[in-house]
Image: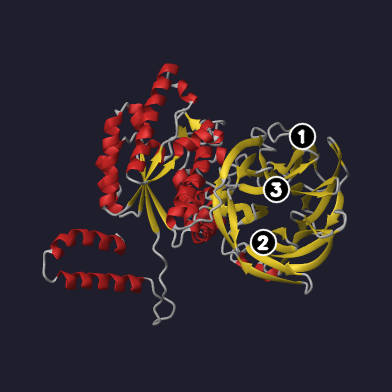
Amino acid sequence: MNLKKLIAISEDKLLSFIYLKFWSALLLAGIVFLAIATLYSCNTTQKEGGDTKQKPEAIKIIAFGGTVTEGTSARLDINHDCFVWGTTEVNMVRKTQTWWAISERILTDWADGGVEVINRGKKGGTVADGLVRIEDDVLSHSPDYVLVMFGMDDALAGVEANRFREDLEKIVNRIKEEKAKAILMTPPPISERMTVNCTTEELKRRQAHLTGLVQAIRDIAEKKKLSLIDLYQYFLDNHLAYDHLFEGWLPDAVAQSAMAPYAAGELLPLMGVNNYPNPTLGDYRKVYSDAKNPLAKHNGFTDLTYFQDEYYVAFRSGAIHGFRGLLGGKTLVLRSPDGITWTKDAELKVEGFVETRDPKFLQVDDRLLVYPICHDFPESGRLTEHYGYERIGPGKWSEPFKCAPSVLWRPKKWGDKYVAAGYEWKFDEQGKRYFKVVLYQSQDGREWEKVSTIIDYEKDANETELFVENNTLTAFSRTEYGGNGEMHVSTYFPEEDRWETVSSGRIIHAPCVFQANTRTFLIGRYCSHSDDRFRELQSDWKKFTQYVQKPDEEGYQTIAESAGVDPARIEEYHHGLRTGIFMIDGTRPRLVMELLSAGDSSYSGVVKDGDEYVISDYSMHEYYPVIRKPGDWETPCDIYLSRVIFGQ
């Protein structure tokens, strides 16, 4: 229990005693003085012993309720099978994909001192059950806020409305007694999908019963002047969320990825944060899959553009994430008039290269170009070149033209020319590879020349997104060991041909930057664990993925077999990778929302369509396995498209 709550409780218990005693004034003054002195000492920099300034205490939130609150009882995505790769077992929502876990990550990025969300949802838990559990499950944790969400299990169990209201008020009163803040949440509605398990008449009775309980929740919130997060109304207003209710009442992972930023947006103002952009997920759909084709099951590394009234998405299609032997990849380009129905427009591969990947679009006047990276492995070593293609007409693209000797990332228009960040590499005497990032420019999108070095080898940077705002050119770069793995932000001073670079303090891969409502946003692959935890697990990952020849028998074993790496740690590392959307605050990325994703994922493109932002990415979440040995993660990856609206 924090000090402020302790003082508040102590005052309540002491007041009657203090006021009856003649020395009450002196005693009360002493208590107040000690409290102020203690609070002051907890929030003041101590001069002795260096900088020992204490961080603000993390805000503790309890999510308290039933099955919907708990969050893991729904299938991952009700529109798809979501079979664990190689089995008929269905992937359900994992704890890290629940609305409350995602909300915790968002809130932590925005609230000083961070936020801890403890889930105390119970499958089948009614409000009466909650009244029994509240002491051990909630109040023993001394929370700052309690999110109270009952009603769905009560409706399905036929709990009478007056009894529900009485028990819910008792829960609220008990929370108030402990000086925590109760925040009421309504459950989602019951949708027509429930008719799979009941008749239409039974569905209507359940819907009517739930509506009555929801109104009781709203009435209590109004009567007691409590904050209310009205998920019931949110689901009715958001067709995507409503259409993703598993068995008609449980939000699947798509719905929970939409719930999370909505809940965070309701909570942050209570914590004094008022600049969260309140995103709304309006659509989420699969664009492409070839999961049954072993040579083309891995589809990823996307880009997206809108050209001559049609959407175009480009991505790499291959057998696995990388390339092994002759198992390389090709670039596919799809087009669509509406983002829903797609047709193949091109299949691109440069002769003489085993791999064609990471395509990026550029529109030059009324021309559309795409630039894939090409890899080969001649006897002299690895060969990497960048080629371009120009669209000639429907289903027709030019022959490939060579445009750069290094890897170009997404080109942009800057003034009267086009610019792109490219990355090169070199090897030291021990064979370790180091990267640097350079600025290229072009007048026509075909011929590119180097202009300057953005980040030299010591920072070990590669994938770099350029962002143009008010004629200012900024680069967002992924780094490896030299940059501590963190994304770095560089600002260009062209009159001096100089870049100033700082770390964002955050590990983010494959950045894609855009502007919405005068704010700057970034999409990229990040780890849902802390960055420190990510680095810790990454060392195990590197051991787990290396092979050594067995000395005494044929075949191979992994270093993990001799080093004793726990596969559960590898799964934690790999599954923690997600497609995150961030708002850039200065140079600091603050998480705004996650798109449903896991493992091999992200590498996005974005297009503005009215008030919506259409986002492409890829992910393997539907097939995610339990990792027991190296290679278990080599599952299919599919291409997805989302639509997001950002609030003012």
Q: Amino acid at mark 3?
A: Phe
The reply to whether discs 3 and 2 touch (Cβ–Cβ < 8 Å) is: no
Marks 3/1: CA distance?
A: 23 Å
Up/down of 483 relative to 164, above or below:
below
Question: Which label's residue is closer to the chain start, 1 or 2?
Answer: 1
Tell me the number on the disc at residue 344: 1
Name the residue beneath numbered marker 2: 477
Residue appearing at x 30%, y 39% in the figure = 168
| Residue 384 x %, y % | 78, 56
The reply to whether discs 1 and 2 touch (Cβ–Cβ < 8 Å) is: no
| Residue 576 x %, y % | 52, 50
Question: Which label's residue is closer to the chain start, 3 or 1?
Answer: 3
Q: Quadrant of the N terminus?
A: bottom left
Marks 3/2: CA distance?
A: 24 Å
Bin the neighbour count of mark 3 within 10 Å (Cα to Cα): few under 14, some 14-19, many 20 and up: some
Up/down of 648 relative to 236, above or below:
below
* Nearest the eye: 84 or 579: 579
| Residue 221 x %, y % | 36, 42
Element type where label 2 sits in the image: strand
Name the residue beneath numbered marker 3: 323
| Residue 330 x %, y % | 76, 43
Residue appearing at x 18%, y 73% in the figure = 26
